[in-house]
Amino acid sequence: MWGPLSTPASDNASTPVSALTTVQRPYRTFASTTAQFGQGDASLGIRAAGADVYGGTNEYGAIKLPSAEQPGTSATVEITSQADTSDWAKAGLMVRNDIDLPDTSPGYLIVAVSPGHGYVMQWDANGDGQLDTNSAPSGQGTGTTTYPSWLRVIRSGTTFTGYYSTDDTTWTQLAVANIPSAAPNQDVGVFSTSHSDDVGETDFYQLTIGPPGGAIDAPRTLLTPPGKASTVSVSFYNHGSAPLNNTAVTLNAPNGWTVSPADPVVLGTVTAGASESATWQVTAPAGALAANTLSVAATYDESGAESTSGATIQAIIPAADLGPLYNNVGITNDNSTSVGNIDGAGSSLSAQALAAAGVTPGSAVAHGGLIFAWPDVPAGQPDNVLANGQTVPLSGSGSTLGVLLTATYGPASGTATITYTDGSTQPVTINAPDWYANPPSGSDPAITMTYRNRSGNTQQIHAINVFYVGVPLQQGKTAQSLTLPTVGGTALSGTPAMHIFAVAIG
């Protein structure tokens, strides 16, 4: 799978890897540990470390097809080789509502092979986003491992059946599991975890998913201020082996929203291995909920039968548009750290460490019962507000105002002022713990990363935190604006500063 005459391909990795080619769309990659990826025709390869995928541990590298698993779908793959980094190293098929959310996404299932324990199916029975149930007794698998091996998952409604084969002819059932938390359309693909600090390689061949052969690659989240048109673009992929005819894609929004064009976007025939795109303008009404679901549905003819594929987008109405006030670069890519300076000493949050924690530009961050819109800007651009008395208009209603924030050279504290539409004001004290120090008693870390970036494209292994602070709003009143504490408008080494990333009401 891996060869010397090649191009680099990596994801969340400290060094580049030589692979036949980079992984091509419609496949996407994700890593919650050190992992590297490659593709050559029908072969896929993953080099990954990772402690495990069970219980509270979710460390894996994955190559996925977004939103391609749905009722009636069968997924099959051949595993041609697997590094023996541990007798419980695991590799195989993964199904999950969102493979990019390793610690929280439900609808979670794997069918895997391990070097020392044969074959296993594990799933999330209680919907908390963690594997908790096995097809075999704890610490055991089924059968004797051989290579190549074939794995299969078949979905019917929310019931999943896992199989393995050592000859691609005779299939042995591992388990049948009902997973009520499975979304109508889920991510599905291959994964690998070494069950070790070492990086181990797994090679896969002929991953087939379907029917249906259509999959919609859509953004997971959309930030859309009320009354302002936002662009939604999706790609429709034919990952099957036959053309898909009479293809049309529709975007549906809640009542009161405006979608243009309102009629289905006609894509016609999409040949095997090809893709087409569709774009809409979406406008949320005043008073829209903080979090809303948009649904994308495709209809098409596949081998003479009508088929459908779908995806969902979480549309987030930000309580405050902080974008015009961003005045600090707090997030950088691991290979371009010099542009960041969250603390006045050349340090920054890592975009890759944030992604491993499930936070990407524009994504939804749920904490404290609120939904926050993470800054929707690329790494290396201004992405937070140094609190220094700025006033931010607010929208939305609820009983709590929440802030995602952190302090550098902190803690940092100050008095903020909430102004209501009736002209009354409410002073509140905002305390931001230090991002690098151990979280103090009573604080509430909302996002925890495993390292931070330093100048010179280096990383410092240490827990880094963004915190949640919630403030009760006065009953029966509507918040109009928030005046931030006056702490300081410049990040200076040795001087406390307060960084505001997002504000929400709920």
Image (cartoon, grey):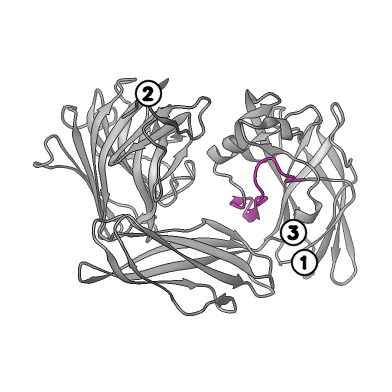
At which x and y percent is residue 463?
Answer: 63, 28
Which SS does the magenta portion mostly show?
Answer: loop
Question: Where does label 1 land, which residue?
Answer: 475
Q: Residue furthest left?
A: 170
Question: Where does label 3 land, which residue?
Answer: 321
Q: Of callouts 2 and 1, which one flags the residue occurring earlier in the amino acid sequence?
A: 2
Binning the other alpha carbons within 10 Å of mark 3 as few (below 14), some (14 to 19) or many (20 upward) gives many
Looking at the image, which residue is at 76% across and 32% down? 434
Please report contact status of discs 2 and 1: CB closer than 8 Å, yes or no: no
Q: In front here: 310 or 302?
A: 302
Decide whether residue 373 is among the magenta residues: yes
At which x and y percent is residue 1?
Answer: 31, 30
Quadrant in the rendering for residue 48 = top left
Q: In front here: 433 or 85?
A: 85
Q: Nearer the viewer, mark 2 or mark 1?
A: 2
Amino acid at the residue labelled 3: Asp
Distance of label 3 from label 1 (alpha carbons): 24 Å
Q: Is residue 440 visible?
A: no
Residue 31 in the image: above or below residue 455: below
Q: Of callouts 3 and 2, which one flags the residue occurring earlier in the amino acid sequence?
A: 2
User: Which region is colored magenta?
Assistant: 362-384
Please report contact status of discs 3 and 2: CB closer than 8 Å, yes or no: no
Residue 421 in the image: above or below residue 126: below
Amino acid at the residue labelled 1: Gln
Quadrant in the rendering for residue 350 = top right
Q: Is residue 185 visible?
A: yes
Q: Secondary structure at mark 2?
A: loop
Question: Where does label 2 land, which residue?
Answer: 4
Distance of label 2 from label 1 (alpha carbons): 66 Å
Q: Secondary structure at mark 3?
A: loop
